[in-house]
C-alpha cells in the first residue's frame, strides 16, 4: 500500500546537518510517509549517515546521483515518490512535529475548491536569534507571485502529487529561484492555502544556496 506522503530531502555535502532534518521527519505526529533522500553527488559521508537511519526505519529510501543541482535532485525525488502528497525538506532545515498533520488537516477542511498547495509560517533562525515569517494572505496568489516569491522555502510546502503531472518538474536551468518558478506555474492552475503558524525552522548560514550564487547568475535567472 502506498504511503500518504512522500517526503523528499535533496542534499549535497551536508552530512553534519542532515541528521537533524531526518530526525524531524521521523518525529512527525503523522507517520504514514516514505522518506526519499536524494544525494546529489556528495563527497562526504552522507551515505553512511543515511544508512545508519535506514537500519532503524525501512521507510527511508536513499538515492545517489551525479551532481545535478537542487532542481535535478528534487525531480529525482518526484520520480521515486509514491505518495498522494509531496512534501519537501531542505537538508539544512527542520520540521516541527505537527507539520504534516496540520497541513493535511487543512487539505481536508479548506474551503478552496481546487486546492493543490499548502504552505505555512516559518521560524527564521540565525545564530541565537529567531523570528517568525508570516505568510501573507492574498486573494490572487498567481498575480502576487509574479511580483515576488512570498513562499518562504520549499521546506514549508506540501503539494498533491498529481499537481506535478500537470505542471511538470523543477526547471534545471535555474540556479536562482527554481522554487519560485514552480510556485508560479502551480498558482496558474491550483488554489493555495496556508497554516497560519510556524511549522518549520529555516536556518540562515553561510552555505545557503542563494548566498553562494554569483550576482551574475542571480540576475540572469531573475530576468528569466
Image (spheres, rainbow, N blue to C red):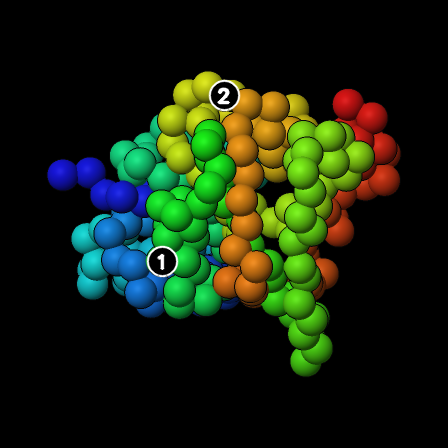
Rendered location of residue 162, percent (x, y): 38, 26
Q: Is residue 140 above or below residue 152?
A: above
**Residue at which label 1 appears:** 101
Quarter of the image with the C terminus is top right
Q: Is residue 137 above or below residue 143?
A: below
- Residue drawn at x 31%, y 36% is 84
Rendered location of residue 159, percent (x, y): 45, 38
Q: Is residue 114 above or below residue 167?
A: below
Rendered location of residue 158, percent (x, y): 45, 44
Rendered location of residue 124, percent (x, y): 66, 66
Quarter of the image with the N terminus is top left
Q: Is residue 58 left or right of residue 40?
A: left
Q: Is residue 170 left or right of residue 210?
A: left
Residue 3 in sight here: yes
Of the two numbered discs 2 and 1 in the rendering, the one whose residue sits closer to the viewer: 1
Q: Quadrant of residue 48?
A: bottom left
Badge 1 element: helix
**Residue at which label 2 appears:** 168
Q: CA distance from mark 2 to mark 1?
A: 26 Å
Q: Between 12 and 172, which is closer to the camera in this rendering?
A: 172
Q: Is residue 17 left or right of residue 148?
A: left
Q: Between 68 and 139, which is closer to the camera in this rendering?
A: 139
Give the residue at the far front of this rendering.
111
Give the residue at the far bottom of this rendering.
128
Q: Earlier in the sequence, mark 2 or mark 1?
A: 1
Disc 2: CA contacts within 10 A as few (<14), some (14-19) or many (>=20): few
Q: Between 79 and 194, which is closer to the camera in this rendering?
A: 194
Amino acid at each position: 500500500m502506498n504511503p500518504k506522503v512522500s517526503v523528499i530531502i535533496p542534499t549535497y555535502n551536508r552530512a553534519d546537518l542532515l541528521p537533524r532534518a531526518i530526525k524531524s521527519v521521523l518525529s512527525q505526529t503523522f507517520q504514514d510517509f516514505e522518506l526519499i533522500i536524494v544525494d546529489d553527488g556528495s563527497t562526504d559521508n552522507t551515505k553512511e549517515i543515511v544508512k545508519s537511519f535506514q537500519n532503524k526505519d525501512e521507510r527511508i529510501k536513499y538515492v545517489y546521483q551525479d551532481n545535478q543541482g537542487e532542481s535535478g535532485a528534487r525531480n529525482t525525488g518526484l520520480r521515486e515518490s509514491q505518495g498522494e502528497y509531496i512534501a519537501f525538506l531542505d537538508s539544512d532545515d527542520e520540521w516541527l512535529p505537527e507539520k504534516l498533520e496540520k497541513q493535511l488537516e487543512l487539505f481536508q477542511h479548506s474551503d478552496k475548491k481546487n486546492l493543490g498547495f499548502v504552505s505555512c509560517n516559518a521560524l527564521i533562525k540565525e545564530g541565537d536569534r529567531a523570528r517568525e515569517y508570516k505568510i501573507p494572505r492574498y486573494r490572487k496568489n498567481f498575480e502576487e507571485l509574479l511580483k515576488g516569491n512570498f513562499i518562504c522555502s520549499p521546506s514549508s510546502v506540501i503539494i498533491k502529487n498529481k499537481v506535478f503531472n500537470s505542471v511538470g518538474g523543477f526547471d534545471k536551468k535555474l540556479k536562482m529561484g527554481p522554487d519560485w518558478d514552480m510556485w508560479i506555474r502551480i498558482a496558474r492552475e491550483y488554489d493555495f492555502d496556508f497554516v497560519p503558524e510556524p511549522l518549520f525552522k529555516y536556518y540562515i548560514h553561510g552555505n545557503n544556496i542563494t548566498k553562494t550564487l554569483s550576482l551574475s547568475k542571480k540576475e540572469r535567472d531573475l530576468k528569466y
